[in-house]
Image: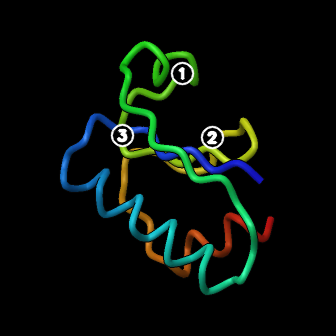
C-alpha cells in the first residue's frame, strides 16, 4: 500500500503526516508513506485544498486534518 500526504509543509500537513504514521502503526500494516510537497505533483491529483491523503493513487481526503481514527477508516476501505 502506498499512502501519499499532499501538502506544502504547513502545520496542518505535518499533523496529517503524523496522524497517517500513527494510524499505519496502530493497524500494524506495511505501507509506503510519502510526503508530496511539489505543487505541480499535487495539482496532478486535482487537489485544490491541502492537506490531502492519497491511498494507492486515489484521493481519499483533502482540505482538512483527519483524525487517526478517520485515517484508519480510509485505509480499511
Q: Which residue is mark 1?
A: 46
Q: Quadrant of residue 15?
A: bottom left
Q: Residue at x 29, y 56 (%)?
A: 14
Cα separation between marks 3 and 1: 11 Å
For the C terminus, the image quarter is bottom right
Q: Identify the coloring.
A: rainbow
Residue 18: percent from the left, percent from the top? 39, 67
Residue nearer the viewer, 61 or 20? 20
Q: In the structure shown, which secondary structural element does the residue marked by tag 3 occupy?
A: loop
For the N terminus, the image quarter is bottom right
Q: Is residue 74 above or below residue 45?
A: below
Q: Are marks 2 and 1 in contact (CB under 8 Å)?
A: yes
Q: Is residue 23 above or below residue 58?
A: below
Give the label on residue 7, or none: none
Residue 44: percent from the left, percent from the top? 56, 16
Q: Is residue 58 above or below residue 1?
A: above
Q: Which residue is mark 2?
A: 59
Q: In the structure shown, which secondary structural element does the residue marked by tag 1 occupy?
A: loop
Cα separation between marks 3 and 2: 11 Å
Residue 63: percent from the left, percent from the top? 38, 46
Cα separation between marks 2 and 1: 9 Å
Q: Residue at x 74, y 67 (%)?
A: 30
Question: Is residue 37 toward the left or the right of residue 24 in the image?
Answer: left
Amino acid at each position: 500500500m502506498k499512502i501519499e500526504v499532499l501538502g506544502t509543509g504547513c502545520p496542518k500537513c505535518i499533523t496529517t503526516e503524523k496522524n497517517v504514521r500513527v494510524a499505519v502503526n496502530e493497524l500494524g500494516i506495511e505501507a509506503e508513506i510519502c510526503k508530496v510537497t511539489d505543487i505541480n505533483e499535487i495539482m496532478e491529483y486535482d487537489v485544490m485544498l491541502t492537506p490531502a491523503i492519497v491511498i494507492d493513487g486515489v484521493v481519499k481526503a483533502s482540505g482538512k486534518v483527519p483524525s487517526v481514527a478517520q485515517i484508519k477508516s480510509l485505509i480499511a476501505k
